[in-house]
Image (cartoon, rainbow, N blue to C red):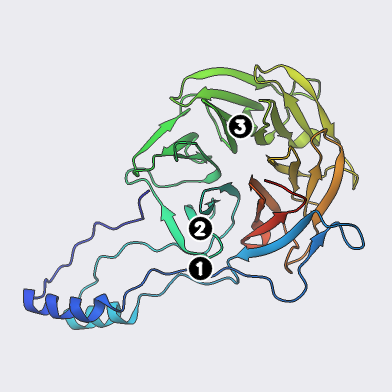
């Protein structure tokens, strides 16, 4: 994956001797910026609340606080003063303005930040942050992410009306630009890519090469219909879970697009929704659905029965504000806490592999 970069050149070049002298001095000073994570201090929140046995435990958040754009290092400002020119430098990753989509990776997680028009890769728990970019295709509105077994990063860019695929070597390609309107959620399973497009009220299924295979949904309130789908995930058995946001439910289809039913419904508590946004499936089959109005992640067991809700409105550790994307890898749950401009990390308890 490539970092953001600049092609600007230095207008007035210093002599070779000066360059060498400065490089020797500065090489030991330069370092990669980090956006530090927040780690537990004091009592760690768990869910459900005591005295019930905990099933989920808060692990930390990234970033710890809201930083501003990283200022140019002192040595760079000194060079500018000496040579009277602005030196070319790569753009640096900054804290997200509105983290919306999140995907679990081998080293941590990736974040789609539509307001900041950036995609960031974050190592957890160190907080080391890298900006991911395509040289000829700047991000317009990255909304959702998925990572393939081959290490490719799939980015649903709602502004571009396409899915951008970033290979492990940094090369980029697009798919779906002729059929998608505003892709908002994606999921990978085997050799298939599932894309939820809210304005189309459908989930479109592609091969990883970009060929359209079939579609699910169509606007409506009945069985097999969808009304602004905003999330999609695939279970271990191949069944497809779709956040049917304006029908206040999670719809379920087979891997062939056949209707299998739904769960949820409009309401407060007990596994019901006000504004469901995203869905993820854990390795033990538990289902995690974010609700941006209730400020919770609703957890269902593998049989779709309500288990618990974690979060709650606020900005303290474990509290949420407008939660959006959710992702699970192993025993970690990642939640894009968009209203608080952070990603929160939770540990799934109870022998999760």
Q: Pointers 1 and 2 in contact (CB under 8 A)? A: yes
Residue 320 at least partly seen = no
* Residue matched to label 2: 122
Residue designated by label 3: 197
- The residue depicted at 74 percent of the width and 76 percent of the height is 42
Instruction: Judge from the rendering whether residue 129 lies leftward or rightward of residue 19; answer left or right.
Output: right
Q: Secondary structure at mark 1?
A: loop
Q: Is residue 89 left or right of residue 139?
A: left
Name the residue at 67% across, 27% down. Answer: 201
Query: Which comes sooner in the sequence, label 1 or label 2?
Result: 1
Q: Is residue 303 above or below residue 132?
A: above
Residue 296 percent coordinates (x, y): 78, 53
Does residue 318 show up?
yes
Badge 3 density bin: few <14, some 14–19, many ≥20, Cα 10 Å: many
Give the residue drawn at x 88%, y 61%: 49
As rendered, which of 31 and 198 lies closer to the eye?
31
Q: Does residue 262 lie above or below 273 as drawn?
A: above
Q: Pick whichever of labels 3 and 2 is earlier in the sequence.
A: 2
User: Disc 1 or disc 3, which is closer to the eye?
Assistant: 1
Callout 3 secondary element: strand
Q: 86 left or right of 216? A: left
| Alpha carbon distance from label 1 to label 2 | 9 Å
- Neighbourhood count class around disc 1 (C-alpha, 10 Å): few under 14, some 14–19, many 20 upward: many
Q: Which mark is residue 35?
A: 1
């Amino acid at each position: 994956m490539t970092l953001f970069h600049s092609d600007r050149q230095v207008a007035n070049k210093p002599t070779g001797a000066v360059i060498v002298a400065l490089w020797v001095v500065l090489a030991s000073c330069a370092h990669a910026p980090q956006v530090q994570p927040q780690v537990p201090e004091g009592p760690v929140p768990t869910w459900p609340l005591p005295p019930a046995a905990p099933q989920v435990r808060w692990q930390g958040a990234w970033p710890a606080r809201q930083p501003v754009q990283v200022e140019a290092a002192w040595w760079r400002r000194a060079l500018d003063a000496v040579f009277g020119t602005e030196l070319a430098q790569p753009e640096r990753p900054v804290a997200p303005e509105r983290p919306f989509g999140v995907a679990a990776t081998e080293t941590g997680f990736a974040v789609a930040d539509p307001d900041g028009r950036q995609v960031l890769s974050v190592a957890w728990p160190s907080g080391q942050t890298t900006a991911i970019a395509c040289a000829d295709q700047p991000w317009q509105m990255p909304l959702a992410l998925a990572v393939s077994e081959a290490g490719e990063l799939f980015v649903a860019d709602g502004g571009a009306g396409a899915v951008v695929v970033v290979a492990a070597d940094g090369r980029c390609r697009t798919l779906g630009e002729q059929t998608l309107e505003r892709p908002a959620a994606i999921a990978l399973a085997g050799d298939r890519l599932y894309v939820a497009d809210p304005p189309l009220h459908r989930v479109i299924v592609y091969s990883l090469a970009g060929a359209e295979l079939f579609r699910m949904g169509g606007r409506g309130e009945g069985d097999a219909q969808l009304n602004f789908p905003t999330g999609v995930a695939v279970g271990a058995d191949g069944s497809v879970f779709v956040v049917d946001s304006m029908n206040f439910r999670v719809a379920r289809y087979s891997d062939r697009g056949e209707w299998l039913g739904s769960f949820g419904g409009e309401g407060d508590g007990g596994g019901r929704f006000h504004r469901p946004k995203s869905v993820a499936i854990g390795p033990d089959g538990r289902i995690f659905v974010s609700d941006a109005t209730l400020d919770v992640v609703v957890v269902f067991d593998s049989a779709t029965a309500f288990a618990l809700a974690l979060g709650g409105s606020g900005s303290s550790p474990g509290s949420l504000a407008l939660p959006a994307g959710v992702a699970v890898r192993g025993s970690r749950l990642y939640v894009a806490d968009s209203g608080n401009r952070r990603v929160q990390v939770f540990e799934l308890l109870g022998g999760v592999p």
